[in-house]
Image: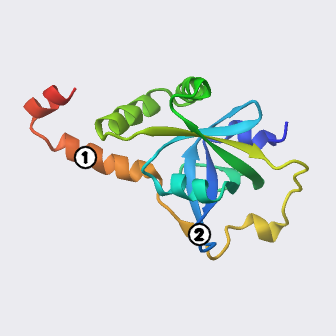
Amino acid sequence: SMHPPSFADAECIKLVTRRRNGAEVATPVWFVLWNDTACLRTATRFGKVKRLNNDPEVRYAPCDWDGNVSGPWLEGRAELIPATDERAAVIDRLLDGKYGERRAAMSRLMQADGMEPVFVAITPAAGFVKPSAKAQATPANAIASPPSFMMIRRSARAMNGMPSATMKGAR
């Protein structure tokens, strides 16, 4: 496997994508390993999708929900997979298996918010060499982007602020 054991045990990966101006944006995301690719789901409206369309080359490392890195950085190439692709269904099931009810709740919120899902499969670069200790640190110019979950949590709060009759109708 191209992925060290630390990936198998990790809650998230810290995904570093690049803006057109070269600035890096780091986001912790839920993921599963499938066929030795790191797979995740996001929504078409999120910035990382635009960044991946412009530049599929990424760096990623195992981390926790707060983005604390717990293993080596890998370089890879991301492929955007539409929700209609048969691979999306497999990745979706694997993510459900790993994250259970927490993910089911997030999926309901994304749906309620009209978000269109899109999947990402990251293939690690062949012949990967572990970067030096210096490269392992998040570069000074990397912008920490809060997990998209923060945006979703905000809309959840907004939904919960609705009168209960409206909520019943929304279910």
Q: Is residue 88 above or below residue 135?
A: above
Q: Label 1 belongs to which residue?
A: 157
Element carrying mark 2? loop
Task: Inspect the image, locate mark 1, and give the three-letter code of the amino acid beneath it.
Answer: Arg
Question: Could one spot residue 155 in this view of the protein?
Answer: yes
Q: How dense is the environment of label 2, judged by Cα within 10 Å: few (below 14), some, or many (20 and up)?
A: few
Q: Is residue 40 above or below residue 97?
A: below
Q: Quadrant of the N terminus?
A: top right
Looking at the picture, how far across and down is residue 171, in whole percent?
Answer: 22, 26
Q: Is residue 62 above or below residue 142?
A: above
Looking at the picture, how far across and down is residue 152, in whole percent?
Answer: 36, 47
Name the residue nearer the viewer: 56 or 15.
Answer: 56
Residue occupying the point 25% across, 46% down? 157
Q: How dense is the environment of label 1, judged by Cα within 10 Å: few (below 14), some, or many (20 and up)?
A: few
Q: How many marks?
A: 2
Q: Label 2 belongs to which residue?
A: 20
Residue occupying the point 44% across, 51% down? 148
In three-dimensional space, the C-alpha distance between marks 2 and 1, rounded to whole angstroms, equals 33 Å
The tag earlier along the polypeptide, 2 or 1, is 2
